[in-house]
Image: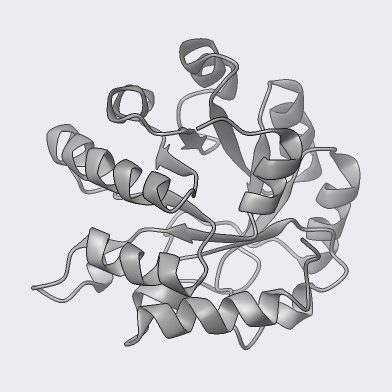
């Protein structure tokens, strides 16, 4: 899949990040994402820190096919090799992962490179290094990412104002608190437990999609 700047920004509206720790024994990541995509998810990241490379590649191959069948971009957390081998649309890297410039060099200009940032300085550097979008957080308290730094709503506003590339807010976001992000300048939100911990994944995604529509214009 290829993306213009406008289409990429629109696709970042409701961004699902995987976490198989929430899955019941008889449920797969594909099952959850099929439901979430039906509820309106517009972007997917495979992020499984405890998964080995072979299993990661196997999951990525299947999820890339699923996402593309829905016309939704799919990226892999950090692992550029898995992203290339699976046909993913790109990668998302953190401040301590593969450098943005290295990911861009390997993937080339036609792929997506997202970067995590928690300060204006990190955001500006990521943009200068060729990032296509930023993931900024944690905006609210979260137990899903052990390494997440707290980012105030004021800093989120400042980051959105400081860069020209789209910004996605992440961290503890739910249908109940997403309204607090109104006016921040974000292109969308990334969620983990708001979907993966829900009993009805499709309804959870649909509810969040509806509430988010009051916060972000598409």
Image location (x, y in percent) of residue 123? 74, 38
Question: Is residue 184 depicted above or below 93 in this figure?
Answer: below
Viewport quadrant of the C terminus: bottom right
Q: Is residue 86 left or right of residue 153?
A: left
Which residue is depicted at the point 55% across and 36% down?
A: 95
Q: Nearer the viewer, residue 110 or 146?
A: 110
Which residue is depicted at the point 38% across and 49% down?
A: 69
Figure quadrant of residue 27: bottom left
Q: Is residue 16 left or right of residue 29?
A: right
Image location (x, y in percent) of residue 156? 78, 58
Which residue is depicted at the point 83% across and 50% down?
A: 160
Q: How is the image coloured?
A: one colour
Figure quadrant of residue 108: top right
**Residue 193: in sight, yes or no?**
no
**Residue 216: in sight, yes or no?**
yes
Q: Nearer the viewer, residue 178 or 49?
A: 178
Q: Nearer the viewer, residue 125 or 204?
A: 204
Image location (x, y in percent) of residue 117? 65, 44
Q: Nearer the viewer, residue 167 or 39?
A: 39
Figure quadrant of residue 138: bottom right
Q: Is residue 214 left or right of residue 197?
A: right
Image location (x, y in percent) of residue 65? 31, 43
Q: Is residue 37 left or right of residue 61?
A: right
């Amino acid at each position: 899949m290829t993306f213009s700047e406008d289409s990429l920004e629109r696709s970042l509206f409701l961004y699902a990040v995987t976490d198989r720790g929430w899955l019941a024994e008889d449920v797969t990541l594909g099952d959850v994402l099929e439901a979430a995509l039906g509820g309106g998810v517009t972007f997917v990241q495979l992020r499984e820190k405890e998964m080995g490379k072979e299993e990661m590649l196997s999951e990525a191959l299947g999820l890339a096919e699923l996402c593309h069948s829905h016309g939704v971009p799919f990226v892999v957390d950090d692992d550029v090799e898995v992203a290339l081998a699976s046909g993913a649309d790109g990668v998302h890297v953190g401040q301590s992962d593969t450098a943005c410039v290295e990911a861009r060099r390997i993937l080339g200009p036609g792929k997506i490179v997202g970067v995590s940032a928690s300060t204006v300085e990190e955001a500006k550097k990521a943009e200068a290094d060729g990032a296509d979008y930023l993931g900024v957080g944690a905006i609210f308290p979260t137990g899903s990412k052990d390494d997440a730094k707290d980012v105030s709503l004021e800093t989120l506003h400042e980051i959105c104002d400081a860069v020209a590339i789209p910004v996605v807010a992440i961290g503890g976001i739910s249908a109940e608190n997403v309204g607090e992000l109104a006016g921040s300048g974000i292109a969308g939100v990334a969620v983990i437990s708001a979907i993966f911990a829900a009993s009805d994944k499709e309804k959870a995604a649909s509810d969040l999609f509806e509430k988010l529509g009051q916060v972000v214009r598409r």
